[in-house]
Image (cartoon, rainbow, N blue to C red):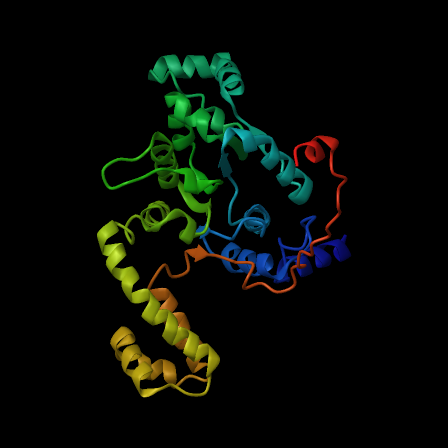
């Protein structure tokens, strides 16, 4: 028994706790994002990897870590109706996380299972909706379409409260300064009822500036409150990006022009950062925290990740059908 407790203590102290138990191939770019995000309290981030790089795995790793370490206890996954069973199987097969699907039929059944004591309490206090099906399980999976169709279910999902919510295919949530889609409105309501939020979406280049801003607005409405302000800020990001690239490429020197630019962005703090042993990294971290999307956007591209096999054409000539020969 003592040996078991000691072993459990070693596991809890391991920096890889919550990340190594998954039945997945441990790819560096996925582990980096999972380790960076999962350690945060109530992480609210945008996972915008290119298609095929494993956003679902990254979200699962983050969720698994948060649950294993006690940072989260209640989690909600909201996906399109066509992906419900795919997510159910992936979470169980890869992470041993048993999510309960709540659809209209199960929602109605759970509402009908109110016992006599609950009925008496509801009668005394006049609360006809005391039974909340979304509080029946800690890990819940449901479709966005269901929440859009059912106002009662939507209200119950919001009232239940969540430690972490995952939304897949978030780039399909339509929004503009003038109006927003019902799907976007539902996710916006749920995002306010969840401490942590993971939005899985296409890359910003694919969805456009306004749509990208709409996703960021869900993560941090106080920081991203105005589209035009965001557009103006974006014009300066490229200049900052160029300076950061030069700092990464030449870690021992800073040009006069770059120093002046950094002084304008960081003010008096620049001298303190440059006096540190890890001066360049400290400056880069300060820029990430103060400018652009900071640490809420994570995006991997195939061009930036090494080790993917290259496709090679293997031509195989096919016999020409007689019909083609007759028409020549």
Residue at image coords 27%, 61%? 233
Residue 95: x %, y % from top left:
65, 44
Q: Quadrant of the C terminus?
A: top right
Q: Is the residue 154 above or below the residue 256 in the image?
A: above
217 to the left or right of 298: left
Residue at image coords 48%, 28%? 134
Q: Is the residue 326 above or below the residue 253 in the image?
A: above
Nearest the eye: 39 or 85 = 85
100 to the left or right of 227: right
Nearest the eye: 242 or 157 = 242
Residue at image coords 51%, 53%? 49
Residue 138: x %, y % from top left:
54, 35
Nearest the eye: 55 or 66 = 55
Residue 200: x %, y % from top left:
48, 45
Task: Report how many numbered discs are placed on residues in the image.
Answer: 0
Q: Is residue 137 visible to us here?
A: no
Quadrant location of residue 244? bottom left
Q: Is the residue 112 above or below the residue 160 in the image?
A: above
Q: Is the residue 217 above or below the residue 256 in the image?
A: above
Residue at image coords 30%, 48%? 221
Q: Is residue 244 visible to us here?
A: yes
Residue 51: x %, y % from top left:
54, 48
């Amino acid at each position: 028994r003592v040996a078991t407790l000691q072993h459990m203590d070693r596991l809890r102290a391991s920096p890889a706790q919550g990340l190594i138990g998954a039945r997945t191939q441990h790819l560096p770019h996925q582990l980096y994002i999972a380790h960076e995000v999962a350690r945060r309290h109530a992480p609210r981030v945008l996972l915008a990897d290119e298609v095929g790089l494993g956003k679902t795995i990254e979200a699962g790793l983050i969720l698994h870590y948060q649950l294993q370490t006690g940072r989260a206890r209640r989690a909600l996954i909201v996906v399109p109706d066509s992906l419900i069973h795919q997510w159910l199987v992936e979470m169980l097969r890869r992470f041993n996380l048993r999510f309960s699907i709540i659809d209209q039929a199960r929602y109605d059944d759970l509402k009908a299972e109110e016992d006599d004591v609950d009925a008496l309490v509801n009668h005394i206090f006049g609360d006809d909706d005391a039974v909340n099906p979304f509080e029946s399980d800690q890990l819940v999976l449901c479709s966005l379409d269901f929440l859009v169709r059912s106002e009662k279910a939507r209200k119950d999902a919001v009232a239940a409260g969540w430690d972490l919510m995952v939304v897949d295919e978030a780039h399909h949530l339509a929004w503009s300064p003038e109006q927003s889609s019902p799907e976007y409105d539902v996710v916006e309501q749920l995002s306010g009822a969840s401490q942590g939020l993971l939005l899985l979406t296409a890359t910003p280049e694919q969805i456009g500036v306004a749509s990208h801003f709409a996703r960021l607005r869900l993560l941090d409405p106080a920081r991203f409150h105005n589209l035009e302000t965001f557009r103006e800020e974006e014009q300066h990001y490229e200049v900052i990006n160029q300076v950061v690239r030069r700092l990464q490429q030449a870690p021992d020197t800073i040009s006069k022009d770059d120093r002046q630019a950094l002084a304008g962005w960081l003010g008096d703090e620049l001298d303190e950062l440059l006096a540190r042993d890890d001066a360049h990294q400290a400056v880069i971290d300060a820029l990430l925290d103060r400018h652009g999307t900071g640490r809420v956007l994570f995006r991997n591209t195939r061009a930036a990740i090494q080790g993917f096999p290259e496709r090679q054409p293997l031509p195989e000539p096919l016999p020409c059908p007689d019909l083609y020969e007759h028409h020549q």
